[in-house]
Image (cartoon, grey):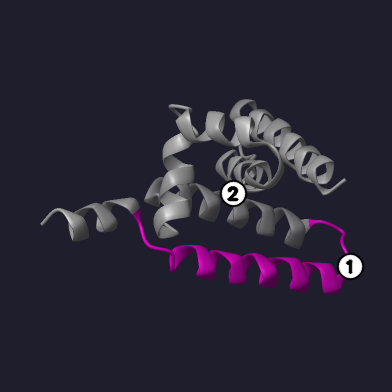
Amino acid sequence: MMKWLWRSLALIALILGFIGVIVPGMPTTVFMLMAAGAASRGWPALHDWLLRHPRFGPPIHHWRDHGAVPRKAKWLALATMLLSMWMICVSPSALWVKWCIPSFMTLILIWLWTRPEIKSIATEHHP
């Protein structure tokens, strides 16, 4: 039963990741990371395919091996979250929404920017 739950989660994340390839501003990498994590628990063939994929494989390896996030991804996340925060703040949303969601996004950005970057990891291993 758990195998099918992990497979379902992997498939949903994979579909959202593919949508992110097409739709500007929607993340791809985070969903591929989720797909790889879920597939590793219930769909080994999909997990192996993701790890070997020329576009999705390297970020998955960097995350899995080092917890690393590319600087480009950090800047893209910052830009899209700032745009989202602005849209929330100018919307007719409730005041608690205008405070809570941007605060949560800020915490996520702080966490994201404290992750190592691929470039810094490469220089640590190859002086």
The residue nearer to you, when weighing 127 against 95, is: 127
Q: Give the range drawn in magenta.
A: 91-117
Is the Cβ of the residue at disc 2 closer than 8 Å to that at disc 1? no
Q: Please state which of the two labelled residues, at mark 2 or mark 1, is closer to the viewer.
A: 2
Task: Residue at 37% x, 62% y: name it.
Answer: 116
* Left or right: 52 in relation to 19: left
Is residue 46 found left or right of 63 in the rendered image? right
Judging from the image, what secondary structure is the residue with disc 2 in? helix
Tell me the CA gap for discs 2 and 1: 21 Å
Crowd around label 2: few <14 · some 14–19 · many ≥20 (10 Å): some
Q: Sequence-wise, which precedes: disc 2 or disc 1?
A: 2
| Left or right, 67 with reference to 98 | left
Say which quadrant the N terminus sits in. top right
- Can the viewer see residue 23 in this picture? no
Q: Position of residue 88 (x, y in %)?
A: 76, 58
Above or below for 80 versus 89 = above
Q: In which quarter of the image is residue 29?
A: top right
- On screen, residue 25 above or below 90: above
Q: Position of residue 103 (x, y in %)?
A: 68, 72
Question: Quick one: 48 or 34, which is closer to the camera?
Answer: 48
Q: Can you say which quadrant of the picture contains the C terminus?
A: bottom left
46 drawn magenta:
no
Query: Which residue is denoted by mark 1 in the rendering?
Result: 94
The image quarter containing residue 95 is bottom right
Asked if the magenta segment contains residue 103, the reply would be yes
Q: Position of residue 80 (x, y in %)?
A: 59, 49
Name of the residue lying farthest toward the left = 127
Q: Which residue is drawn at 19% across and 57% down?
A: 125
Predominant SS along the magenta part: helix
Judged from the image, the secondary structure of the residue bearing numbered disc 1 is loop
Mark linked to residue 80? 2
